[in-house]
Image (cartoon, coloured by chain):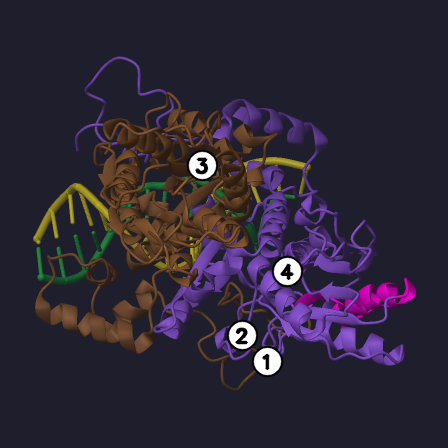
Chain colours: A brown, B purple, C green, D yellow
Amino acid sequence: MTGKDGGIPKAVAPGPEAVVPGPEPASASAPTLETVAAEAGVSRATVSRVVNGSPKVSDEVRAVVQAAVARLGYVPNRAARSLVTRRTGSVALVVSEAEMKVFTDPLLAAMVRSMGVALSARDVQLVLMMVRADNERQRLTGYLLGGHVDGVFLMSLHEGDPLPRILHDSGVPVVQMARPLGDVKLPYVDVDNVHGARLAVRHLVAIGRQRIATIAGPPDMVAGVDRLDGFREELLGARMADHRVAFGDFSQSSGEQAMLALLADHPDLDAVFCASDLMAAGALRALRRHERRVPEDVAVVGYDDLDVALLTEPPLSTVSQPVEAMAATMVDMLLAQVAGRPLPSPAILPTRLVLRASG
Amino acid sequence: MTGKDGGIPKAVAPGPEAVVPGPEPASASAPTLETVAAEAGVSRATVSRVVNGSPKVSDEVRAVVQAAVARLGYVPNRAARSLVTRRTGSVALVVSEAEMKVFTDPLLAAMVRSMGVALSARDVQLVLMMVRADNERQRLTGYLLGGHVDGVFLMSLHEGDPLPRILHDSGVPVVQMARPLGDVKLPYVDVDNVHGARLAVRHLVAIGRQRIATIAGPPDMVAGVDRLDGFREELLGARMADHRVAFGDFSQSSGEQAMLALLADHPDLDAVFCASDLMAAGALRALRRHERRVPEDVAVVGYDDLDVALLTEPPLSTVSQPVEAMAATMVDMLLAQVAGRPLPSPAILPTRLVLRASG
DNA sequence: CTGAAAGCGCTTACAG
DNA sequence: CTGAAAGCGCTTACAG
């Protein structure tokens, strides 16, 4: 063994008396419950109780133990704890390999970030689990049976994805982001996409727009179909035509593309509701190229209320989703299941319309 | 405890004789070494050896054990193993919370995907560790001391990021993607960005372009400065002007923006080297808007060789990086350190120019 | 409220 | 080549 140690503490065998004199490699091994117990003059059990916040410890003793913990910089060994509690203290974000683009979508990135914050506050780790198209089932099942994670988050699902079924059957706690499109019933959190879309369209009607178009999301994703439904419902209620529809995949370039198509087919349109801010940003670009003023000639409303909505010219009116609350709810719902509580019901969080300059 | 169990196996206390007759909840607990040993008629130690691929087991016994493992669907308990080996079997991808955009960059997404594949082949898990600006140090240090992960990957670093220093001092095995810009010496893998850029520019010179511009990346990122250096070096060697420079942040819209600026300042340019494919895609868009034909009027070369390079019109000539090899190397370098081998030297992988229609 | 003791499922010298 | 045994660091009934 040459060179740097790499930081992995060796199993410090007490073994035959140390041959080399001089100082030990200072604190080569991390403090354990045992160490802390000795330092505090109590039993391991008591230290364990303090560390785990058990109420049945006298304040006096608690203080002494806490001081010892702090002095020694004690951090519980996760593996040991896990071995007895049968919990790993980590949950997985399962994404199909093809879907690595999970992270390409800024909304999902924001969700993951917020989930990470909520999770770390509860001291649970987020494990990234990629599933490949081919040997999915076996590897995933193996992981789950191996008890590597306590629960699973599922995001950005398309219709026909086998993951929900696999996870459902495996019995692990699962929470999905977005209402499941298939027949598998799993707990989920979502916003009322239909309502959100209606809010946006209602506003466009209210400001007097007559020929309202939409750039919808993919028809195999719930956010795609629900927002389109909301668009249609609202226009129907207003007795207005709802046939100005183009589709995108939530990306900026697809939005630009779609806007171009709409402009070609319906040059007289005076408003467009976009199912994502990114698509709205693309639409803005196309409109500018065609020298339509926003909002004077064409009013634009987006969906998501991402940072980008503030950066466009003009800033986007958009449907805002409570990202932090959604993330926190997903975390709560998963950890509740992990704790053995009954299956939570789906949570539908509210949306609101944020008015800025674009419409 | 009501309702569904949630999939966490209870600690099956053998306790006082089962009061309830009838069949046990089928295989309520996963098989252990013990179970397998009994099934195979050998000791736990032997099963352990087989499972861990120890060579000192007779072929005969090995076969019997493997059969038992398969029959029972045995998967080792990670916590128990970890407790004795002092390894967790997981490594972290540490990203600063602000930098969640790690995932917004398709190159990084591709890297993470490839790393995931390489990692899972070695049966190690990827943990996402977010560090918040404020209490960074303590939380991170706590995690590392808690032995939650065996090593750390660092990606997408900007100058001035305190993470490398923190990690270096903590002694955990680390591998960085991209050459460190600061003074902290950590193992890393990178491509020769200067050389890659020179290849691209050399090609543009070779096909007779006279007024070559570049859209460079951010000056606080190594891929930004190195590719710009390569651009300058090559033009210097060819005794050509190297002042047509605009900057972007690797994103498509920044590329479009930058191209517009270049066109305004240097309307006579006849080629542009872009430090990322995304920026090149943006540039293409701007050029189209200004009715410059590509490559007739302006030749365009990108960098990265991502999927997008094939989707643009025309398809992009670009500098290709060996993403899979980079990911595999990063994994190798980290796991080598985890195994206690000496600090690996940096790995610089080769780039090559891929010629398509854009230049 | 506190402690002694058992046990979680594994790996690894140590004998044979 | 194989097994008996110790031990990794924790939690949790069980007594007191």
Q: Percent position (x, y) of residue B61?
A: 65, 30
Q: Which residue is mark 4?
A: B279
Classify mark 1: helix, strand or loop: loop
Question: Circle 3 sits in a helix, a strand or a loop, which is it?
Answer: loop
Q: Are marks 4 and 3 on the same chain?
A: no
Q: Are marks 2 and 1 in contact (CB under 8 Å)?
A: yes
Q: How many marks?
A: 4
Residue that carries the numbered disc 2 in the rendered image: B164
Of A37 and B263, nearer the camera is B263
Q: Chain of mark 3?
A: A
Q: Which residue is mark 3?
A: A217
**On the same chain: label 4 and label 1?**
yes
- Residues packed near mark 2 inside 10 Å, few (<14), some (14 to 19) or many (20 plus): many
Q: Which residues are magenta?
A: B187-208
Q: Which residue is rendered at x = 67% and y = 38% of the image? A: B57
- Amino acid on which the number 2 mark rests in the picture: Pro
Residue B41 visible at all:
no
The subunit letter for the residue under badge 2 reads B
